[in-house]
Image (cartoon, rainbow, N blue to C red):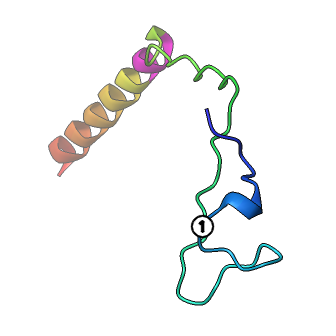
Amino acid sequence: MTTPDPEPSRTPGLEPGGQVSPGETPPAEGDTFGTHPDPPELRKGWGAMPLIVIMVVVVLVVIGLIAMAISL
């Protein structure tokens, strides 16, 4: 396991005082440890009532369109 903040005296590529010399890549960051929250549960989908309401509206629109076509 590595420490998240390495000691500057032992880190290669650092100038005195902990600064990164020009052209060098800074040291990598340390890992974050801990637990992650559980993802939210997925919903099962649409309930029966909204589907019934949508089907009733579609049937009423179709009946209205058929009535308009007959009255022409």
Residue placed furthest toward the right: 17
| Residue 30 versus residue 49 in the image, above or below | below
Q: Amino acid at mark 1?
A: Pro
Q: Residue furthest bottom?
A: 22
Q: Position of residue 45 (x, y in %)?
A: 43, 18
The answer to whether 1 appears left or right of 45 in the picture is: right
**Neighbour class for label 1 at 10 Å: few (<14), some, many (≥20)?**
few
Horizontal side of residue 11 vs 45, given as left or right:
right
* Magenta part, dominant SS: helix
Residue at image coords 63%, 54%: 29
In the image, 3 versus 31, the foreground residue is 3
In the image, the segment drawn in magenta is 49-53
Position in image of residue 46 (x %, y %): 44, 18
From what the image shows, is residue 39 above or below residue 8? above
Q: Which quarter of the picture shows residue 13?
A: bottom right
The residue indicated by pointer 1 is 12
Image vertical order of residue 25 relative to residue 44, above or below? below
Q: Is residue 50 left or right of residue 12?
A: left
Residue at 68% of width from left, 22% of height from top?
Answer: 35
